[in-house]
Structures are given as C-alpha cells and as structure tokens.
Amino acid sequence: MRKSIGPKKIKTAVFISGKGSNLKNLIKFAKNKRYPFSVDLIFSNTKKAKGLRYSKIYKIKKKVICYDKKIKTDKKILKILTQKKIKLICLAGFMKILSKNFIKKFQGEIINIHPSLLPKYKGLNTHIRAIKNKEKFAGCTVHYVTSKLDSGKIILQKRVKISKKDNHFSLAKKVLKIEHLIYPAAIKKILN
Ligand code: GRF
C-alpha cells in the first residue's frame, strides 16, 4: 500500500451498489485533514444505487457501469481509475465480485467492509445467521480484497453485543454504526 506523505491525500474510489451510508461517512472523514485520503470517484454497478446521490451533494465524479460483461467492465473501470490516478479502492456495499485480473492489478490497494467478525460469516445474510446460531457478539471487519471472497488479511475489526431483543434489523443498525467508526480508522491505519 502506498503511504501518504505530508499533506498530500491518497486518491480513493468508493464502489457501491446500494444506500451508501459508508460512502457518505468516508466522504465526511476525508474532508478532515487528519485523514490521509480523498474521495475522488464514486463507482456503482447500478444506477439504482441510492448512494449515487452523494456525487451531486459533495461534487464528486460518479461512474455507473453495469456488470453484464465482467471482463470488459473491469477493463473500462481500470482505465478510469488510472486516468484519475486512484490509488485506493474502498468497497462499501458493492455487490459484485471483481475479476481476478482486476484484483491483481490493484493488489493490496482494494479494501472491503464486511458486516461480520470474519472469518465467521463470509458472504450474505450475516446477521440472520449470527442470530440463528445464538452468537453473543456480532461485528464488522475491514479487510484487504483477494480473489477469495471475504478472506483477505484483516485490517480492523470491532464487535458489538447481540442482545436477546435483537433481530437482524436492529443488529444491522448496530453494526452499521460501528462500521462507520472502523472504516475511516482502517484507511488511516494502512496509509499512515
Ligand atoms: C454494509 O453493512 C457493509 O458492511 C456491507 O453492505 C452494507 C452497505 O451499507 N458490505 P451502505 O450502503 O454503506 O449503507
């Protein structure tokens, strides 16, 4: 991972597919000079992603490319990322799997946030599974992206207690709150 030197911020792209609460949170942290990154591009695989609205609100360039032809799409994105000198990719609720070639080109420079205490509960429906298994704790993890789903080296992790009253909706809310704490902290950790 390229480190940030002096006041120069590392140019970052955030990849989303949905609501974009993590995107919004990263944009806010990036404005703080103590955080060594800037959000320069919002990428989505669908124009339905609600988070795309932050492009207009915060005047950040957005790009939507549907993922019907993966290899072609990955090539197109790579071109844009190179043009914009993007050095870090943050996946935040991005629901597509990037090609091996893409991951190789950006090795060590793509990170993801996952709503579970990895290596537990890789994949989807993490909260439903954690509650069903009567786990005492849930949480979230920021990790490097490799070609194996949710398996790259862990950067930061934080846990929350699952109370008896929790259902997967309330748990998702609790976890999202701590996601918003650890994602910017994880970026700071790898760039400083
Ligand atoms: C988060 O729970 C994240 O961990 C998961 O997808 C969700 C995205 O939420 N990968 P948002 O779009 O950032 O609000």
Image: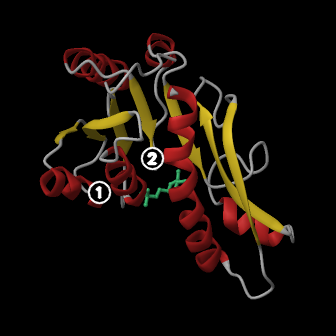
Task: Inspect the image, locate mark 1, and give the three-letter code of the amino acid beneath it.
Answer: Gly
> Badge 2, how many Cα within 10 Å: few under 14, some, many 20+?
many
First in residue order: circle 1 vs circle 2: 1
Left or right placement of residue 180 versus residue 132 in this view: left
Q: What residue type is labelled 2?
A: Ala
Query: Is label 1's Cβ within 8 Å of ligand 1?
Result: yes
Residue 112 place in picture, x, y as percent: 53, 39
Q: Give the residue displayed 49% in from the left and 33% down from the top.
A: 97
Q: In this view, does 98 lie above or below 142?
A: above
Q: x, y percentage for residue 11?
A: 31, 27
- Taking 8 as reference, is 116 left or right? right
- Horizontal side, residue 111 vs residue 125: left or right: left
Residue 60 position (above or below residue 67):
below
Considering every residue shown, the one lying at the far bottom of the view is 165
The Cα atoms of the two marked residues, 1 and 2, are separated by 10 Å
Vertical arrangement, residue 67 with respect to residue 126, above or below: above
Q: Is residue 172 rendered to the left or right of residue 32? A: right
- Residue at left 78%, top 81%? 163
Q: Which residue is drawn at 32% across and 33% down?
A: 68
Secondary structure state at the residue bearing disc 1: helix
Q: How is the image coloured?
A: secondary structure
Q: Nearer the viewer, residue 48 or 188?
A: 188
Write the residue at 55% across / 66% down: 177
Q: Do the residues labelled 1 and 2 touch (CB within 8 Å)?
A: yes
In the rendered image, which quarter is residue 189 located in? top right
Looking at the image, can residue 66 be seen?
A: no
Element type where label 2 sits in the image: loop
- Number of disc labels: 2
| Residue 51 tag number | 1
- Badge 2 residue CB within 8 Å of ligand 1: yes
Q: Position of residue 135 (x, y in %)?
A: 85, 67
Residue linked to disc 2: 92
